[in-house]
Image (tube, rainbow, N blue to C red):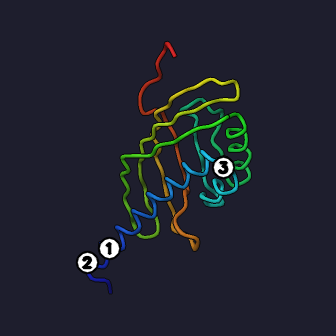
C-alpha cells in the first residue's frame, strides 16, 4: 500500500505527464505532425470544435486523422501557447481544462488570434496518458467586428 507521500508524488507525476500531453498536442499541430497528433488520442476519442464553428465532432482515429489533416492543410503556420492547466486525477482517468492563446496564419496570408478553452478527459494507457475527449470552445466571446 502506498503511503500518503507516495500517492501525492504519483498524482503530481500524473499531472505533469498530462500537462506534457497538452504541450505535445501544441507541438504536433504547430509542426504539422499529423500522425503524432492523432497518436495523442485514444482509438475512440472525441474531438469537438463545434464551439468554433466545426459542423460536427470527430470520433475515432480515422475521423481525427481526416479532420486534423484538413485543419493543418489549411494553415501556413500556427502557434499554440497552453496555460492555466487545472487537472484532476482519479486513478487511470483524469479531467482538466487548459487555456490557450493561438496564433494562426492561413494559406491566404490571413492572420488570426484565438483564445480557446480546452475541456479534456484523459485516460492512462499502456503508452501513457492520452486524450479520450477534447472539447474546444472560445474562452472569450467572438469580436463581432473581427
Residue 5 has which mark?
2
Residue 144: x %, y % from top left = 48, 15
Q: Earlier in the sequence, mark 3 or mark 1?
A: 1
Q: Which residue is mark 3?
A: 59
The residue at the far bottom in this view is 1
Q: Residues within 10 Å of mark 1 (few under 14, many from 20)?
A: few
Residue 68: x %, y % from top left = 68, 44
Name the residue located 31 percent from the left edge and 76 percent from the top edge: 7
Residue 45: x %, y % from top left = 61, 55
Name the residue located 57 percent from the left edge and 74 percent from the top edge: 126
| Mark 3: secondary structure | strand
The residue at the far top in this view is 145
In this rendering, position of residue 3 left or right of residue 95: left
Q: In which quarter of the view is residue 54 placed?
A: top right
State if disc 1 and disc 3 touch (CB < 8 Å): no
Q: CA distance from mark 3 to mark 2?
A: 38 Å
| Mark 1: secondary structure | helix
| Mark 2: secondary structure | helix
Quarter the N terminus occupies? bottom left
The residue at the far left in this view is 4
Residue 77 has which mark?
none
Q: CA distance from mark 1 to mark 2?
A: 6 Å
Nearest the eye: 104 or 8 = 104
**Above/below status of 84 relative to 93:** above
In this rendering, position of residue 22 left or right of residue 57: left
Amino acid at each position: 500500500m502506498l503511503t500518503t507521500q507516495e500517492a501525492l508524488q504519483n498524482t503530481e507525476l500524473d499531472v505533469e505527464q498530462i500537462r506534457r500531453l497538452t504541450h505535445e498536442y501544441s507541438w504536433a499541430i504547430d509542426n504539422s505532425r499529423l500522425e503524432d497528433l492523432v497518436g495523442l488520442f485514444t482509438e475512440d476519442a472525441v474531438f469537438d470544435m463545434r464551439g468554433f464553428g466545426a459542423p460536427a465532432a470527430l470520433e475515432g482515429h480515422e475521423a481525427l486523422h481526416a479532420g486534423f489533416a484538413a485543419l493543418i492543410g489549411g494553415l501556413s503556420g500556427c502557434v499554440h501557447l497552453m496555460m492555466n492547466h487545472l487537472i484532476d486525477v482519479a486513478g487511470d482517468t483524469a479531467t482538466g481544462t487548459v487555456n490557450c492563446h493561438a496564433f494562426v496564419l492561413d494559406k491566404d496570408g490571413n492572420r488570426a488570434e484565438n483564445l480557446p478553452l480546452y475541456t479534456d478527459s484523459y485516460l492512462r494507457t499502456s503508452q501513457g496518458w492520452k486524450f479520450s475527449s477534447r472539447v474546444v470552445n472560445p474562452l472569450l466571446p467572438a469580436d463581432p467586428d473581427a
